[in-house]
Amino acid sequence: MLRNFLTMDGTEEPEQPSDSSRVLVVYFSATGNTESVANTIADLTGGDLFEITPADPYTSDDLNWTDENSRVVYEYENPEARDIELAEDTVDNWDEYDVVFIGYPIWWGIAAWPTDSFVEANDFTGKTVIPFCTSSSSGLGQSGDLLEELAGTGNWLEGQRFRGGAPAADVAAWVESLDLA
Ligand SMILES: Cc1cc2nc3c(=O)[nH]c(=O)nc-3n(C[C@H](O)[C@H](O)[C@H](O)COP(=O)(O)O)c2cc1C
């Protein structure tokens, strides 16, 4: 919608930004599944993307939950080790976003914990927050509620779980059902 308005003195000036919501899609993804859903949401909504990146990224050995000596198993068993430092935990022009999607993989039934660090670092006041996750088989469970609790601010909607590799059409059907302005 790029209409121009005539001002009192007859010169044209650009219209104010449209009244549709500005969308940000924040996600953490260790192996690409959540990233793929995030990309689809951003395409569909015209939203901007922000990837949550741990300062010390997870290698595939780190992610091996079948190895009792792996990093994720250690963090799972030691909740105090889940306070993951991020490369960046703030988003440019954060105040301008009305709608924030937050995506993450499910790890042991909850949101992969690097997501927590982002949620704790930001103020969601005045924003609609929409969680989404990918997993092999688990549902969203309490993951959205736990993040909402951690945030303490924002209007959090019921989230949505997708299986890894979910078709874009499934993501599109969900985004449409949200009826975002
Ligand atoms: C450490 C770890 C724990 C996981 N725990 C679960 C789980 O509890 N339930 C489940 O359905 N999938 C689980 N998964 C599978 C991931 O949720 C799934 O592969 C997800 O799509 C990965 O997303 P990503 O590619 O964006 O990292 C786990 C994966 C990892 C690496």
Image: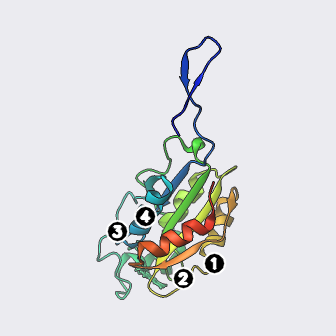
Task: Using the image, determine if residue 41 lies above or below residue 5.
Answer: below
Q: Which of marks 4 and 2 is nearer the N terminus?
A: 4
Q: How far apart are marks 2 and 3 (CA)?
A: 19 Å
Quarter of the view holding residue 174: bottom right
Can the viewer see residue 85? no
In this image, 166 relative to 100: left or right? left
Residue holding disc 2 = 109
Residue holding disc 1 = 142
Circle 4/circle 2 CB separation < 8 Å = no
Where residue 45 appears, as percent x and y from the top left, is: 51, 56
Front position among marks 4 and 1: 4
Q: Which of marks 1 and 3 is nearer the N terminus?
A: 3
Front position among marks 4 and 2: 4
Q: How far apart are marks 4 and 1 (CA)?
A: 24 Å
Circle 2: residue type? Gly
Farthest top residue in view: 9
Circle 1: residue type? Gln
Numbered label attached to residue 40: 4
Q: Distance between the residues labelled 4 and 2?
A: 24 Å
Circle 2/circle 1 CB separation < 8 Å = yes
Circle 3: residue type? Tyr
